Amino acid sequence: MGSTIACEAGAPGVARTGRPDRVGRTGRVGGDVLRRAARSLPRFLAVGLAGLATDAALFALASRLGLPDAAARALSLGLATLVTWRLNRRFSFRPSGRAARTEAARYAAVALCAQGFNYGLFLLLRAGLPQVWPLLALGFSAGCAAAGSFLGQFIVTFGSHRPAVRGAVALRSDA
């Protein structure tokens, strides 16, 4: 099974031979990634709390103004997702190198998946373990979804985006 890797000789992480450097610049596999993730996680969680506060406040306001709960929740959740994307983009993760519109779409897709997982797991826990306190099921499903959301945002939304470099060399690996 073959794969093609585009690299440019002399670029960071690429040996002078034009082949990708297996250990990266630090000399340790994944060292930079783990450090970045460890730095990003507390900020991501703080932004999540800000998003929750935004969601709750907007939902309460929209409900008070007479919107039905479903419409109020859709509005508050959509705006809270926009707020958390902007805050995470500014404080939690390093720039992805993607256009803002592309990054926002990726963020929304990951958030939608995480929210769907959260809801589905909550329903599964409630149906499968009805004796479990509902708020415990809610907290557990929210925690699992937050972990998945962090990984998704870290990798899919804010992961490095390196556009093709002019003069790049394509290498073929038969491994």
Image (cartoon, rainbow, N blue to C red):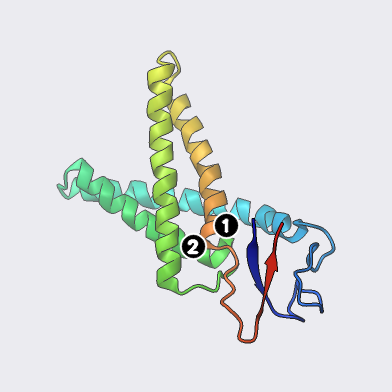
Identify the residue at horizontal 47%, vertical 37% (top origin): 142
Q: Position of residue 89 (x, y in %)?
A: 51, 65
Identify the residue at horizontal 65%, vertical 60% (top origin): 2
Quadrant of the drawing holding the C terminus: bottom right
Residue bearing mark 1: 155
Q: Earlier in the sequence, mark 2 or mark 1?
A: 2
Identify the residue at horizontal 44%, vertical 19% (top origin): 133
In front here: 130 or 20? 20
Q: Is residue 45 visible?
A: no
In front here: 88 or 27? 27
Quadrant of the drawing holding the N terminus: bottom right
Q: Secondary structure at mark 2?
A: helix
How many dots with numbers?
2
Identify the residue at horizontal 44%, vertical 16% (top origin): 129
Residue bearing mark 2: 87
Q: Residues within 10 Å of mark 1 (few under 14, many from 20)?
A: few
Q: Position of residue 127 (x, y in %)?
A: 37, 19
Query: Could you tell me the amino acid type at mark 1?
Result: Ile
The correct choice, above or below, for 2 with respect to 19 in the image is above
Q: Is residue 112 visible?
A: yes
Residue placed furthest toward the top: 131
Decide if residue 127 is on the left or right side of residue 75.
Answer: right
The correct choice, above or below, for 11 with respect to 148 in the image is below
